[in-house]
Amino acid sequence: MVNLARRIIGAPIVHWLALLCLCAAYLQGGLVKAFDLPAAIAEMNHFGLQPAAPFALATIGLELVASLLILGGVLRWLGALSLAGFTLMATFLANRFWELTPPERFMSANSFCEHIGLCGGFLLVAWHDLNKARP
């Protein structure tokens, strides 16, 4: 049973699909922002990020380029660390659950913890990539 699981989960396509799942929200977010730049700028304004347009463009670039680095396997560790750092900062900016009252606090705390989990996933990708590259 373990050997079967190892063969299936160890398949290169499963590895790539797992990375795609990890990057899916960033690919979707980057593309949605790129195709609706006024909404992306409005989002930056909502969170008090000024000047909003450069922040929106930087966010689009980071989400898409870092995801492509991860999926393409080129500087995967850099893409993963970039998305981990971005996610951590965005989580503290957008999911300040400690400032909310129930029931909003519950949903925001869940989202906060889910995003911290994404950070952990990206740290694992970077860790694996950097340790694989050792001589």
Image (cartoon, rainbow, N blue to C red):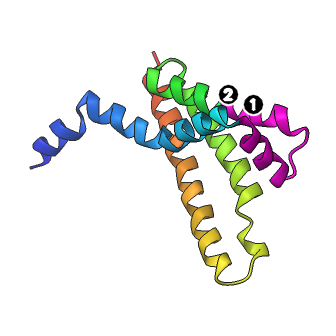
Image: 12 above or below 86:
above
Could you tell me if the residues under marks 1 and 2 are in contact, i.e. CB atoms within 8 Å? Answer: yes
Image: 131 above or below 83:
above
Q: Quadrant of the C terminus?
A: top left
Counting from the top left corner in percent of width and height, residue 92 is at: 74, 57
Image: 93 above or below 125:
below
Q: Which residues are magenta?
A: 37-61
Q: Report the Cα–Cα distance between label 1 and label 2.
A: 5 Å
Residue 51 among those drawn in magenta = yes
Residue 93 among those drawn in magenta = no
**What is the secondary structure assignment of the residue under circle 2?**
helix
Is residue 76 toward the left or the right of residue 97 in the image? Answer: left
Counting from the top left corner in percent of width and height, residue 60 is at: 67, 32
Q: Main secondary structure of the magenta part?
A: helix
Q: Residue at x 59, y 41 (%)?
A: 29
Residue identified by numbered label 2: 61
Q: Is residue 134 visible?
A: yes
Residue identified by numbered label 1: 58
Q: Residue at x 76, y 36 (%)?
A: 56
Q: Is residue 76 visible?
A: no
Q: Residue at x 9, y 50 (%)?
A: 1
Amino acid type indicated by mark 1: Ala
Q: Residue at x 72, y 35 (%)?
A: 37
**What is the secondary structure assignment of the residue under circle 1?**
helix
Label disc, if present, on residue 78 of the rendered structure: none
Is residue 129 toward the left or the right of residue 63 in the image? Answer: left
Counting from the top left corner in percent of width and height, residue 74 is at: 50, 17
